[in-house]
Amino acid sequence: MSVGEEVRSEQERPQQSLGTAAARNLATTTKSAPQMQEISSRWLLRMLPWVNVQGGTYRVNRRLSYAVGDGRVTFVKTGDRVEVIPAELCELPALRSYEDEEVLTELARRCEQREFGPGDVIAEFGSPTDEVLLLAHGRVEKLGTGPYGEDESLGVLADGAYLGERALLDADAIWEYTARAITACTVLVLPRNSVEQVAERTESLSEHLQEQRAIPSQRTNKYGEKEIDLAAGHDGEPDIPHTFVDYEGRPREYELSIAQTVLRIHSRVADLYNQPMNQTEQQIRLTVEALKERQEHELVNNREFGLLNNCEYDQRLQPHDGVPSPDDLDELLSRRRGTKLLLAHPRAISAIGRELNKRGLVPESIEVAGNRIPTWRGVPIYPCNKIPVTEARTTSIIAMRTGEAEQGVIGLQQAGIPDEIEPSLSVRFMGINEQAIIKYLVTAYYSAAVLVPDALGVLENVEIGRWR
């Protein structure tokens, strides 16, 4: 009998037992709870110390500082023409808090665009500083002279940085380093004489610059804080200095942010389809998970309190070769005492691993909540997929010192709110409408505060797509 005849014979044979398809109609199916791909490890929410806030606001009191804040300048590009946004000139220390838009617009018009190629010297050590350089695009390295006469890198600047800001306040200022282009750079130049010409016919600008020139005369420490007069190492009976500690007159206040949604469940579903799993509980569980994912995203990216936007300019670093090398990580850690953790996108952690492999280094790992976490210099590197990756395949690495006692970064919440299911997270019944739909208001209140500037640092523009 051929193979085809055997198959036909078996197909014609009558069924002798119950088939599996029919049997499944009488069987009980084992089911999983609803799964959700969006759920991540959320290490930031887990490792950030949370401080309970009363009244929905947290005020950060600091010592009075005379140092004018630094920032990043923003530009607009039209074809090959680059212009600085006039209001962004207020990021320069000499123009901080200056509010005359017409004058700022005039200063923006006087900026000259220059192009530099890789290796070009943009500013030379020892030459007079008679213009402010605004870096619209590219990477610039600051070079000084080491103790034995060799070139010494003082850091790398990228888009939005500025150089020579002392030119606006000190006519005798000189360049204390050499600035050299690493890549092709577009720079806007604001000459000091242009600012002086505008100040001669604008009383408000002239008065503002005079006030700014008076600030350095204040006795300050290296952080720009008002000096506390002390005496040490003396003998005999000299006059001991009198002093007091002054505070900021207008300290920053962080108000709790909010994330909300209204969950709707039909009463028929809630009544009839609750075995073996409660439909309402599962709907609330998944909604809360999504809310927490958004909460972590806001803590990283929010323009008001997000970590990436609240890092001080002098705590932002650029990688020397683009990739996240061990040297860059060391520089990042050296900017603050007691760094507790690093946060990086998983692809950035992979890039760090590649650079360590090139040097034959094997990082240690520690166990946290049953997970093996890589470390560098004993500081754990936690994955965080909320840190953005740009189209150019660059990202950032965040370093933090945490806790109130350490003057670090803290999370803010308000426990004890009505219908709370977790601290600062509530699920509130909103009633049933005429279509028999049950509604629940799901709410989370949160924020984050940086107690002192050096508690938070960011390694920016890290390349994660380079494999060689």
Image (tube, helix red, strand yellow):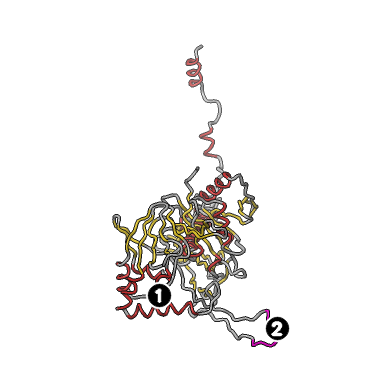
| 300 with respect to 85 (left or right) | right
Specify the label residue 235 is tagged with.
2
Which mark's residue is nearer the viewer, 1 or 2? 2
Residue drawn at 42 percent across, 62 percent down: 161
Query: In the drawing, what numbered circle is on residue 292?
Result: none
Q: Nearer the viewer, residue 136 or 429?
A: 136
Q: Residue at the location (52% across, 67% down)?
A: 448
Quarter assignment of residue 435? bottom left
Instruction: Residue 61: tell me if it is visible.
Output: no
Q: Amino acid at mark 2?
A: Asp
Residue 234 belongs to magenta span: yes
| Magenta span | 233-239
Q: Main secondary structure of the magenta part?
A: loop
Q: For the residues marked 1 and 2, what is the alpha-carbon distance in whole angstroms?
A: 46 Å
- Taking the view exactly as shown, the residue that stands out farthest to the top is 1
Query: Which one is in front, 320 or 422?
Result: 320
Q: Secondary structure at mark 2?
A: loop
Q: How far across and how far down the image is residue 200, in percent?
A: 31, 78
Position of 241 relative to 169 (above/below): below
Q: Is residue 101 above or below residue 229?
A: above
Please check the rendered image and state whether residue 355 is part of the magenta-colored stretch, yes or no.
no
Residue 240 higher or lower than 343, as above or below: below
What amino acid is labelled 1 in the image? Ser
| Foreground of the two, 360 or 354 | 360
Residue that mark 1 sits on = 97
Q: Is residue 127 left or right of residue 352?
A: left
